[in-house]
Amino acid sequence: MLYHLEGLRFAYGSTPVLKGISTEITAGEFIAFVGPNGAGKSTLLRILAGLLRGYEGSIDFSGRAIGAYTPRELAQRIAFVPQETHVVFPFSVGEIIMMGRLPHRHNSLFESPRDRERAHQAMQLTDTESLAGKAFNQLSGGERQRVVLASALAQDPDVLLLDEPTVYLDLKHQLQFYDIVERLNADRGMTIVSVTHDVNLAARYARRMIAIRDGQFVADGPPAEVLTPGNLYDIFEIHATVFQRPDGRGAYIVPLG
């Protein structure tokens, strides 16, 4: 078991966000968290990354309390891709991607041949080789997100946590992004947990979907079981028709007027 959550609660000040979540995540899963704004999806993802403390209940990672790990230990195994990344200094794309190797460097200020190999592989996977010499801050939003993914992949993680990773990408690069992630899951057994508002995209790629509303899980299972008209109304308060995709890859949702 990769993650074990029991009675997880979290609040920002006096405002509760997560209200007693319990679940397990197995290594190699591809999971999508879906739900309305403010449901607690991104907060839960940041707790899974070890970026948020101060919660109640317990969360174990690989059989050990996640709070017992050092940040370096977690960064060697877990990569987190936020919705948006701001960089103050004028780092190049190549430098940003190489930063993904920092958790694996203990005593050296200089990158090793392995570091360069992993960074190069990450750039190939994300089609960012041609951007290597450009300043990160001069890129479009979509280009930046592909570079941040490349930096995360250079980390060589076991777990990839994605917080609305395709919000700034056009349709072509949304599919390209998730095609890359799907290959990593299938070929390397990388565990993928993604937060997204795009239930159609989630249904196409994820094999397990967890719907969150008001800080609680309201549905958990294969996308076809979660995305029913009744569940969609309970989760998003919309009436929708559910169609099966002609390519056999799950369902897609059409909201009714």
Image: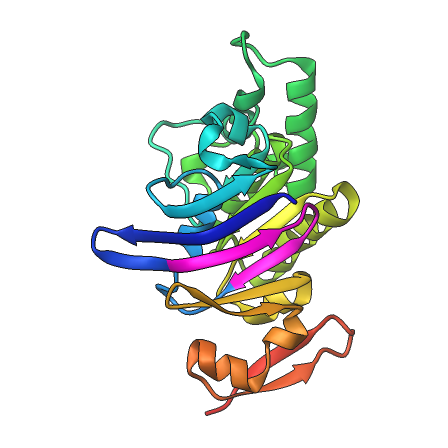
Q: Is residue 140 visible?
A: no
Nearer to me, 86 or 250? 250
When the figure is inspected, residue 114 is found, relative to residue 240, above or below; the finding is above
Q: Quadrant of the C terminus?
A: bottom left
Residue 89 found in image quarter:
top left
When the figure is inspected, residue 73 is found, relative to residue 208, above or below; the finding is above
Residue 64 found in image quarter:
top right
When the figure is inspected, residue 147 is found, relative to residue 218, above or below; the finding is above
Does 70 appear in magenta?
no
Residue 52 found in image quarter:
top left
Q: Is residue 125 visible?
A: yes
Q: Residue at x 66, y 49 (%)?
A: 26
Does 29 appear in magenta?
yes
Q: Residue at x 56, y 84 (%)?
A: 254
Q: Quadrant of the N terminus?
A: top right
**Could you say where residue 209 lies in the image, as x and y percent from the top left?**
60, 65
Give the extent of the magenta segment. 19-33
**Could you say where residue 142 lies in the image, as x and y percent from the top left?**
51, 50
**Could you say where residue 202 lies in the image, as x and y percent from the top left?**
60, 65
